Amino acid sequence: MDKGKAVMGTGRRWAVEFSDQSTVPSSRDILDPPGFSRASQEQDDSANSRQKKDAEANWKLQKAWEVAQSPFKTLMMMGFMMWMAGNTVHLFSIGITFSALWQPISALQSVGKIFEPFKDNKVELLMPKLVFLALNLGGLALGVWKLNTLGLLPTHASDWVSSLPPPQEVEHSGGGFVFH
Amino acid sequence: MAIRVFLLLPVFLSSAIVSFSLYEDQAGLADWHQRYIGKVKHAVFHTQKTGRKRVIVSTEENVVASLDLRHGEIFWRHVLGTKDAIDGVGIALGKYVITLSSEGSTLRAWNLPDGQMVWETALHSAHHSKSLLSVPINLKVDKDYPITVFGGGYLHAVSALDGEVLWEKDFTAEGFEVQRVLQPLGSTVIYVLGFVNLSEAVVYQIDSKSGEVLAQKSMAFPGGFSGEISSVSSDKVVVLDSTKSILVTIGFLDGDISFQKTPISDLVEDSGNAEILSPLLSNMLAVKVNKRTVFVKVGGEGKLEVVDSLSDETAMSDSLAVADDQEAFASVHHEGSKIHLMVKLVNELDNVLLRETIEMDQHRGRVHKVFMNNYIRTDRSNGFRALIVMEDHSLLLLQQGAIVWSREEGLASVTDVTTAELPVEKDGVSVAKVEHTLFEWLKGHVLKLKGSLLLASPEDVVAIQELRVKSSGKNKLTRDHNGFRKLILALTRGGKLFALHTGDGRIVWSMLLKSQACERPNGISLYQWQVPHHHAMDKNPSVLVVGRCGSDSSAPGVLSFVDVYTGKEITSSDIGHSVVQVLPLPFTDSTEQRLHLIADTVGHVHLYPKTSEALSIFQREFQNIYWYTVEADDGIIRGHVMKSSCSGETADEYCFTTRELWTVVFPSESEKIISTLTRKSNEVVHTQAKVNTDQDLLYKYVSKNLLFVATVSPKGAGEIGSVTPEESSLVVYLIDTITGRILHRLSHQGCQGPVHAVFSENWVVYHYFNLRAHKYEVTVVEIYDQSRAENKNVWKLILGKHNLTAPITSYSRPEVFTKSQSYFFAQSVKTIAVTSTAKGITSKQLLIGTIGDQILALDKRFVDPRRTLNPSQAEKEEGIIPLTDSLPIIPQSYVTHSHRVEGLRGIVTAPSKLESTTHVFAYGVDLFYTRLAPSKTYDSLTDDFSYALLLITIVVLVAAIYITWALSEKKELSEKWR
């Protein structure tokens, strides 16, 4: 279906515009009929739209909060999955852990994009963003913690010592039984 | 890196649990087994007209074997124990092989065609004496002539049918030594000739039916005898007197003893000391005088006359009846690179029946022994074949002027083994012959695929097997990527160096040790002399063979440097001093020649190679070089340090004096050293840390200067079971050989040797006998460094603020602690070794040479002091096995599978380039080689891997992608037109 749309979009030669653009004053090249006052309508409109805008801002804020809190659900889900996966290294647990790490990271990268639809002068998006960030960081921490419990983080002394070769010896000695 | 390993290891470990075994069709792919018999001592031919022609031989490796005379193959073979030396071989009744062994105390009969033992008789033995076997040649099969055996001071008559002792006669009188037991053909009287205190000849006449003494005569000889004796006929022997200058003919016809003296100077001019040679010739004897072999004919009245003399390098056979009253013997002498075989009649030495000249490999040395056999040709004339034993112990059959077959029996007595690389494949070296064409390659893989999908017909299975044996060019003489192709260099007791190919065990080259100073030096040991891998790449690698002129420890040494690629001796030098120890040092010069110190009997050490560069390297490390000696007889271990150049005594600037630094004296009344062991100097250890389950860290005490010493109470040094548990105890020590400090001491009450041990990384595993439990035990001791234990701060380690890689000295007296555990082990052990890999990452397996001459691979995890009865979940995941009282013997883990390495004496392991894989070479009378992967081949695909399947899968996938792409294009087009 997508393909069909694209074809339509690019293959268009001519079009008839049926929509009325008369409300846009700059595009108006025909004078208003006599007795028609555009100002009163606009005033009325503006009062109406202010109300509308407030509602929309509220709605946006509400939505923004919803989006901000959405990682919490995935966090819980992840926690459950991790608990199911156990503490041994195998394909399933590694997959879970890496998705648990990847999801918050990708979310953090696109935090601006996610909150773009709610962008408004009147909407204070800082708090939702912060909550979103905190929850995703929490998810990341959970992933790292899981990685650690799997023993895949070099947090122990053994991880750093294992690659060290045994020390050289200063003295050299040889000998044994006399050849018979 | 470490993390990656941690990631991978559990995955592989989980798949590599215990099951180390191979499928039936995998046997012989990577392993080979060669059967030998050793240097032949006696040979008896059995060449009747009917049946297969064979020769029965007994050897210095205590083997009795029946060989096919046509091809030299072994029909059957029995390896007697190391203490069961064979004294004589004979064929009785035309169907039994009779062997006398263990100093005349064990008589056995083996069935001639198949080698089954028919009977065995233990003969009464009182003291050590000569042991003589005489099997009567009976012409009538049905009549049972008794076998007469002298051994341990008793004369026995044994029935050949069932081994029953018919009678025995005591000759254990003080000072009486029996020299010969003779029975004239067809006579019922046995003559027993002996000397009393080497000054009086005594002859007993014994009835062969009853064992009664019929007569006894004795006669004193004022000059005294030397003990060398040659019997020339049934009533005469010739001996040398005590001055070795007079030949005395002793006649004892009808019991009357008569002496007749003939000074050797009468026979040969300006003669020195004489020596009677062993061949038995009728009415004649061979005497070695002045480096010449002189044939002396013994006349009817004991009169001696010289009939011929030959050059020194002559070997002779016993005489053999060829016609009714004629006897012939064979002699072989060298001339340049040829040998001359002559068969002459004993009575007429001018009458040469056979004269053959055969080209002989110089590296076989001289002829040591000749055994002759005759056969009747189709034209009714006599033909002769000769079995000759060469100086390098090889066995050859000569017939009709050619070598019919040869056996490299020197390889039955390997003393030291090392490995060497093959040359790198060069552009000029053509490998095209081995590689197949693409079509053949594909065909082979399709066959393999059929095999793996169980679609193969029986013919296909045979073809697959052939293909696998042939495949991968495993027998090429060039280095391969995985390091599977190598040379095994084996030094034998006969002083010959063999290079065997790991692919199929063939001899690539062989070289006999030579010296200017002495005729034939004994080979002692083998060292890597030059292994170019960073510098001096144009040089071929070489090995150092240390030999000695004579068996005495003060005899002068011989060094020989051998090019590994060509097998040619580069140089050889008589070093002019004795060799008691060789110390390879961990330094190499600019041409990658390893520095070696050779200690002599006077306590000096000599530096090799004798170059100024080596000297400067040595002097830089002068203070840090130590050596120690173990004096097992006195129970003392001494440590020495270099003192100064011995320029005061000799002008040799490469000679250094030493100073005694420490001694460890074991109380002689309670402890006797029975075994010492150090780590292999070329072992690679990957890490110094041992990580426990809870990420707890232990630091291994990895030191090359550790000596494991096992002592037992002097009473318990004998056979197992010869003492009560209260009388015997076993003590093991770990001693630092720099300072003489005893790091660990462990005492096992009621235990006894022999101790077989293996030392690797930071652990020792040893095997001994527990007298209380009546079982063998294995104990593991792991040694850890306490003084480094506080290095546990992660941040310090991350930032590198630690001293874990700083060089350490033994004088810092590191605190150590040990962990140990003991287990029962159901088998008696001959030797233990451990696998070694290139980087030391792969887990280790113990290779236990069992009493049944097989090699058992046992995971190191079974001998781990951390094993407990109920390991926690985490410990189980880590691979810790629940503790059991005895170590399991899993039949599938015998690496020798169906083979037996008869007379197993040693196991050598060497790493391949592939980290997972190790070469294992076991030697005894037989040789066995295999490749092992203790944690399975995690770093390579197996030989069975079906490349064809992979290829087909890829092709199918690519095709599927193209087809679906084309289909979707088509569909899209039709969508658009709709």
Image (tube, helix red, strand yellow):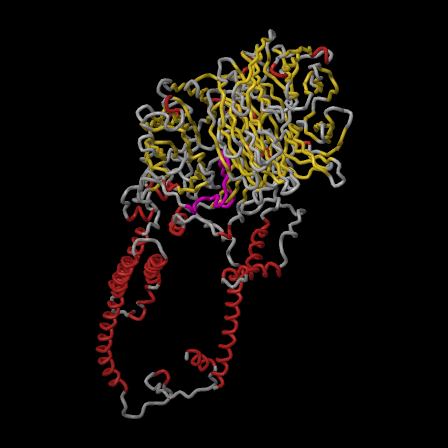
Q: Position of residue B421 (x, y in %)?
A: 57, 40
Q: Position of residue B581 (x, y in %)?
A: 51, 23
- By secondary structure, the bulk of the magenta-drawn segment is best described as loop
Q: Is residue B189 left or right of residue B840?
A: right
Farthest-out residue, top: B222
**Magenta range:** B891-914
Task: Please state which of residues B948 and A48 is positioned toward the viewer in this rendering.
Answer: B948
Which residue is at a point 41% across and 42% down the rendered structure image? Answer: B858
Farthest-out residue, bottom: A34
The answer to whether residue B910 is magenta is yes
Q: Is residue B584 visible?
A: no
Whether B199 is drawn above or below B348: the answer is: above
Dividing the picture into quadrants, the one containing residue A133 is bottom left
Q: Position of residue B117 (x, y in %)?
A: 50, 37
The answer to whether residue B153 is magenta is no
Task: Please state which of residues B185 and B448 is positioned toward the viewer in this rendering.
Answer: B185
Q: Is residue B847 left or right of residue B143?
A: left
Whether B416 is drawn above or below B175: the answer is: below
Whether B6 is drawn above or below B332: the answer is: below
Which residue is at a point 60% across and 12% down the rendered structure image? Answer: B225
Q: Is residue B617 visible?
A: yes
Task: Please state which of residues B883 and A158 is positioned toward the viewer in this rendering.
Answer: B883
